[in-house]
């Protein structure tokens, strides 16, 4: 099983993530949208309200989408080490992973 390294800002390895886990995370369109939004953030940090405002477009039921972000998608990304999600403070910290970026680029190209 291949693993990629999820890195902190200082370049140190935060945790390994298996390629199969990354592909499972990216299999969901909504999680890809969240990760793409977080990747575009300048400082790897974003508030939950900002994420919601940037990712609501195109969703038929924004309230349902907001609940899914909070209760399903962000906790799943946190469990796999791609983010730190503080649900009480509503802050998200994104950790870059080269394999995630490469996979997203490949998916967007097709």
Image: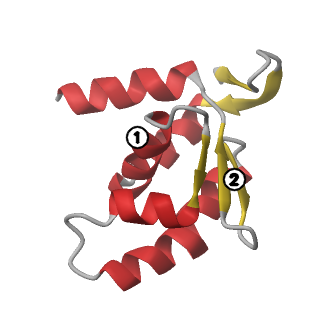
| Residue at the spot of label 1 | 36
* 95 horizontally vs 11: left or right: left
Dot 2: what SS? helix
* 8 horizontally vs 57: left or right: right
Quadrant of the drawing holding the N terminus: top right
Residue located at (32% from left, 25% from top): 105
Quadrant of the drawing holding the C terminus: top left
- Res 102 quadrant in image: top left
Dot 1: what SS? helix
- Number of residues whose C-alpha sits closer than 10 Å to that of mark 2, classed few (under 14), some (14–19) or many (20 or more): some
Measured as percent of width and height from the top left, residue 41 is found at 49, 37
Give yes or no for contact between labels 1 and 2 (Cβ–Cβ under 8 Å): no
Measured as percent of width and height from the top left, residue 94 is found at 63, 40
On screen, residue 25 above or below 95: below
Residue located at (39% from left, 46% from top): 32
Residue located at (33% from left, 53% from top): 29
Count of numbered circles on the image: 2
Question: Residue lying farthest top?
Answer: 11
* 70 horizontally vs 105: left or right: right
Measured as percent of width and height from the top left, residue 66 is found at 45, 75
Measured as percent of width and height from the top left, residue 16 is found at 75, 28
| Residue at the spot of label 2 | 78
Earlier sequence position, callout 1 versus callout 2: 1
């Amino acid at each position: 099983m291949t693993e990629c390294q999820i890195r902190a800002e200082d370049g140190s390895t935060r945790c390994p993530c298996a390629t199969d886990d990354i592909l499972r995370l990216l299999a969901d369109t909504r999680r890809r949208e969240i990760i793409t939004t977080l990747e575009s953030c300048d400082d790897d940090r974003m508030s939950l309200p900002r994420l919601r405002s940037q990712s609501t477009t195109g969703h038929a039921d924004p309230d349902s989408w907001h609940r899914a972000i909070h209760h399903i998608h962000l906790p799943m990304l946190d469990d796999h080490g791609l983010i730190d999600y503080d649900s009480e403070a509503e802050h998200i910290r994104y950790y870059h992973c080269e394999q995630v970026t490469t996979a997203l680029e490949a998916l967007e190209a097709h």
